[in-house]
Image: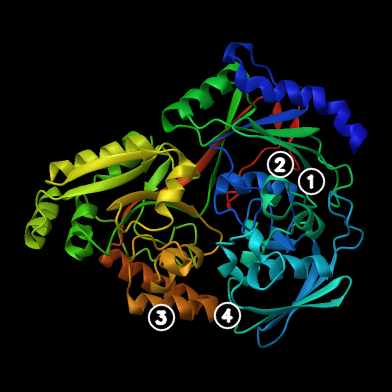
Amino acid sequence: MIRKWKAIAPLLLAATALALVSPAMAQTPPNILVVGQIAEPASLDPHVSTAANDFRIAVNIYDGLVRNKPGTLEIEPALATDWTISENGLEYTFNLREGVTFHDGTPFNAEAVKFNFDRMLDENHPFAATGPFPLAFFFSAVEGVEVVDDLTVKFTLNEPFAPFMSNLASPTGLIVSPAAVEASGADYGRNPVGTGAFRFEEWQSNTSVVASRNEDYWDGAPALEAVIFRPITDANTRVAEMLSGGIDVLLETPPDNVAQFRDDASYSVVEAIGPHVWYVMLNAKEGPFADVRVRQAVNYAVNKESLVDDVLQGTAEVSAGPIPPAFNWAYNDEVTPYPYDPEKARALLAEAGAEGATVTFLVTEGGSGMLDPVPMGTAIQADLAAVGLNVEIQTYEWNTFLSEVNPGLEGKADMAEMAWMTSDPDTLPFLTLRTAAFPAEGGFNSSYYSNPEVDALLDQARVSTNPEERGDLYRQVQAITHDDAPWLFVANWKQNAVVTSAVGDFELQPDFGLVLRGVTKQ
């Protein structure tokens, strides 16, 4: 490991310096993939992170017990070779892969699995303070984790929990090294250790995260010698770096540039459909949007077709609610998007006495799944001005934006952009639309939407093991929330990336993970 790192360090040092030179001077090293990320990661502890930007790095450093089969949302073995589920749906027993070690040389075993989930779920765990763990609710049904033997671990649930396996396959289910957590404590997120295809090497703030090939990877060593993740927050700068040779992979290509790269033989545009929702949360607790009529008015006032066709250049479809159509078994196709109807919007505003109201709108410069947030925000502002709402925009860098929005909009704003990419229809509504998910309760319902009927449907859907019943419950949720309009429903994105002709076997995943273990570079 040390000899290998010393051998490739000069190449990585040269590559990490790319951000400090002009694009015309940039050139990526051979067999080292340079990825243009949309932002600086907040943490590389997968249990602490909530952003896809961070998870794109994490899925290459870590493994979970299970993972999604490439190109699908189907579950396949990873660190667990197989598993059994009790007839009552309360016990999941996993047989673990033999001979796997963490990058720090410590063994992966059942004790390591127990440590990971106890750290997230037990507030008295010795390393619970290395959190917070905002997505630990994915595993809130876990009553206990038992070490049966060195390579067997059993989860006992307090009730049947339909999303359990898909949540295990999510980044929050990735397994970290207990020894590394013990060694780094609160700084573990800057010093990640997993079992994945790539080993973490270094993180230079606002410059790069570097990971090298894991020669001993249980699923076969990757072809790439190393991967460098460069945070390039400005979309136009990412495009310029791609055109000049400074990066090999351009993530979340600005819609205006997709056609440019598609028409150039030096590049390939890679696309994939996945569960994504782009919306604007509306503060239902205070201010004009506490009135459902004003929330509905906003949905009528904004020309979503124009946003999708003109701003996003056809890279998305108009959204009809919180359940993305990629979950076709749970999607309610009888619920149609709000039509563009400014006259209806004006009438609703007049009826609610909200004509001429001033509202504060939080907009981000860019971020995970945020598409083209500044032009989208200004277009929304213009449409709302046309029906008599005075919208004042406040713009933030992505991580600063999250620090403003996630604690809730109360006392600071009326509207805020947001996007979610999920692997189960439970995730987004459970995190953002339940009364019990208000920020003070540890959730992400920053708009304070509350409907007891929706709460009951979501609780029921989580414990149903019948897919048809679950699908029907989510379809009901979509119909109710469409009418309640806690959000301005805008778009479902078709994710994209651009790679140079030197990059091979690159594909985007429906779960929005950036899996690089099979990627090559000539």
Q: Nearer the viewer, mark 4 or mark 1?
A: 1
Residue 488's tag is none
Residue 456's tag is 3
- Residue 139, by quadrant, is bottom right
Where does the C terminus fall, quadrant-wise?
top right
Task: Categorize mark 1 by other alpha carbons within 10 Å: few (<14), some (14-19), many (20+).
Answer: many
Seen at 11% across and 46% down, the residue is 388
Coordinates of residue 465 in the picture (x, y in percent): 57, 80
Seen at 86% across and 46% down, the residue is 220
Seen at 32% across and 34% down, the residue is 310
Q: As displayed, is residue 95 above or below residue 326?
A: below
Between marks 2 and 1, how big is the CA–CA gap? 8 Å
Residue 516's tag is 2
Q: Is residue 258 left or right of residue 46?
A: left
Q: Marks 1 and 3: CB-CB under 8 Å?
A: no
- Residue 351, by quadrant, is bottom left
Between marks 4 and 1, how big is the CA–CA gap? 34 Å
Q: Which residue is mark 1?
A: 197
Seen at 58% across and 75% down, the residue is 162
Task: Categorize mark 2 by other alpha carbons within 10 Å: few (<14), some (14-19), many (20+).
Answer: many
Between marks 3 and 2, how big is the CA–CA gap? 40 Å
Q: Amino acid at mark 2?
A: Leu
Q: Amino acid at mark 3?
A: Ala
Residue 465's tag is 4
Label 3 residue SS:
helix
Q: Is residue 2 left or right of residue 381?
A: right
Number of marks in picture = 4
